[in-house]
Image (spheres, rainbow, N blue to C red):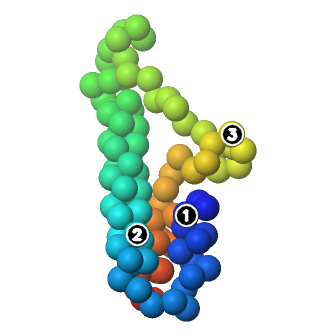
């Protein structure tokens, strides 16, 4: 979040380096978001529901938006939207 805040603060400044940083951040966030969603989908699939508890995948870690111990929320969609909006304005 700090990195994104820095990019947003420098919004008036032009620069290819700033755009590259935003694109790299967007790529990393999108990949992580996709991995988290894929894991959650697998944990809640019909196949996973048929497994004995000791073999079933565990839907962890999951944390809320307001968890102060985690630097980012579990669902990254809002942050991804902010970065996409920032890139669009560049």
Q: Residue at x 45, y 90 (%)?
A: 14
Front residue of 8 and 36: 8
Q: Compared with residue 47, is residue 9 higher up or lower down, i.e. above or below?
A: below
Q: Compared with residue 56, is residue 77 higher up or lower down, i.e. above or below?
A: below
Query: Where is residue 76 drawn, in percent x and y?
Result: 49, 56
Of helix, strand and loop, which one carries label 3? Answer: loop
Give the residue number, with chain letter if any, for mark 2: 21
Q: Nearer the viewer, mark 2 or mark 3?
A: 2
Q: Residue at x 42, y 11 (%)?
A: 53
Quadrant occupied by the N terminus: bottom right
Q: Could you say which disc has been placed on residue 40 in the image?
A: none
Q: Compared with residue 16, is residue 74 higher up or lower down, i.e. above or below?
A: above
Query: Where is residue 28 drawn, in percent x and y?
Result: 37, 56
Front residue of 55 and 66: 66
Query: Where is residue 87 drawn, in percent x and y?
Result: 41, 81
Q: Compared with residue 28, is residue 26 higher up or lower down, i.e. above or below?
A: below
- Can residue 26 be seen here? no
Give the residue number, with chain letter if any, for mark 3: 69
Query: Where is residue 40 drawn, in percent x and y?
Result: 40, 38
For marks 2 and 3 on the same chain, the one whose residue lies earlier in the sequence: 2
- Can residue 43 be seen here? yes
**Residue 70 occupies quadrant:** top right
Q: Nearer the viewer, mark 1 or mark 3?
A: 1
Q: Are marks 1 and 2 in contact (CB under 8 Å)?
A: yes
**Residue 15 occupies quadrant:** bottom left
Answer few, some or many: residues within 10 Å of disc 2's Cα (few below 14, many 20 plus, some between 14 and 19): some
Quadrant occupied by the C terminus: bottom left
Q: Residue at x 61, y 48 (%)?
A: 71
Of helix, strand and loop, which one carries label 1? Answer: helix
Answer few, some or many: residues within 10 Å of disc 3's Cα (few below 14, many 20 plus, some between 14 and 19): few
Give the residue number, with chain letter if any, for mark 1: 3
């Amino acid at each position: 979040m700090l990195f994104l805040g820095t990019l947003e603060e420098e919004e008036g400044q032009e620069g290819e380096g700033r755009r590259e940083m935003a694109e790299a951040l967007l790529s990393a966030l999108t990949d992580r978001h996709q991995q988290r969603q894929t894991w959650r989908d697998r944990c809640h699939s019909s196949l996973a529901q048929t497994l004995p508890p000791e073999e079933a995948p565990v839907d962890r870690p999951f944390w809320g938006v307001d968890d102060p111990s985690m630097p980012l929320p579990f669902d990254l969609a809002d942050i991804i939207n902010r970065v996409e909006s920032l890139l669009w304005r560049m």
